[in-house]
Image (spheres, grey):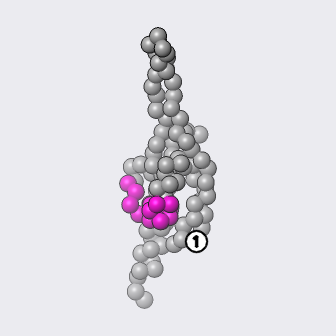
């Protein structure tokens, strides 16, 4: 499985190790990914996602998974996160619909 955050699209970066003698060798900078269960209030379900620590802090700051996905761009989201966003949007439109 790829080392990519499902919410922000943060992925592996490449760079150089630079020694004291200025010798350069390739290295990889890995994102701090964690498998977490996030709860959607509107759907009443939990979703297991592979999320970076920075994205997890952002989700808490925004007020939960629903609020984060409402403002997130689809290009950065994984297909699984896009599906969750679509489900949340459709659930919100059904609740707002007058009877």
Question: Which quadrant of the figure has residue 44?
Answer: bottom right
Which span is picked out in magenta? 60-73
Q: Residues within 10 Å of mark 1 (few under 14, many from 20)?
A: few
66 magenta-colored? yes
User: What residue occupies the far front of the structure in this picture?
Assistant: 20
Residue 46 in view here: yes
- Numbered circles on residues, count: 1
From the viewer's perspective, is residue 53 above or below residue 65? above
Q: Quadrant of the C terminus?
A: bottom left
Q: Position of residue 31 (x, y in %)?
A: 52, 39
User: What residue occupies the far bottom of the structure in this picture?
Assistant: 99
Residue 86 in view here: no
20 magenta-colored? no
Q: Position of residue 82 (x, y in %)?
A: 46, 56
Give the residue number, with chain letter if any, for mark 1. 44
Q: Residue at x 55, y 39 (%)?
A: 2
Q: Residue at x 51, y 28 (%)?
A: 28
From the viewer's perspective, is residue 81 above or below residue 21? below
Q: Residue at x 60, y 67 (%)?
A: 45
**86, 9: nearer the viewer:** 9
What kind of secondary structure does the magenta stretch mostly adopt? helix
Q: What secondary structure is marked by label 1?
A: loop
Q: Position of residue 60 (x, y in %)?
A: 50, 60
Q: Quadrant of the N terminus?
A: top right
Q: Residue at x 49, y 35 (%)?
A: 12
Q: Position of residue 42 (x, y in %)?
A: 51, 72
Horizontal side, residue 51 vs residue 85: left or right = right
């Amino acid at each position: 499985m790829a080392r990519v955050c499902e919410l922000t699209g943060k992925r592996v970066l490449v760079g150089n190790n630079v020694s004291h003698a200025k010798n350069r060798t390739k290295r990889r900078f890995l994102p701090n990914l964690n498998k977490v269960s996030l709860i959607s209030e509107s759907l009443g379900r939990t979703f297991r996602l592979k999320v970076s620590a920075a994205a997890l802090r952002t989700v808490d700051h925004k007020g939960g998974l629903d609020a984060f996905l409402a403002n997130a761009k689809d290009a950065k989201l994984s297909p699984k996160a896009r599906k969750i966003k679509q489900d949340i949007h459709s659930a919100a439109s059904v609740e707002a619909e007058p009877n």
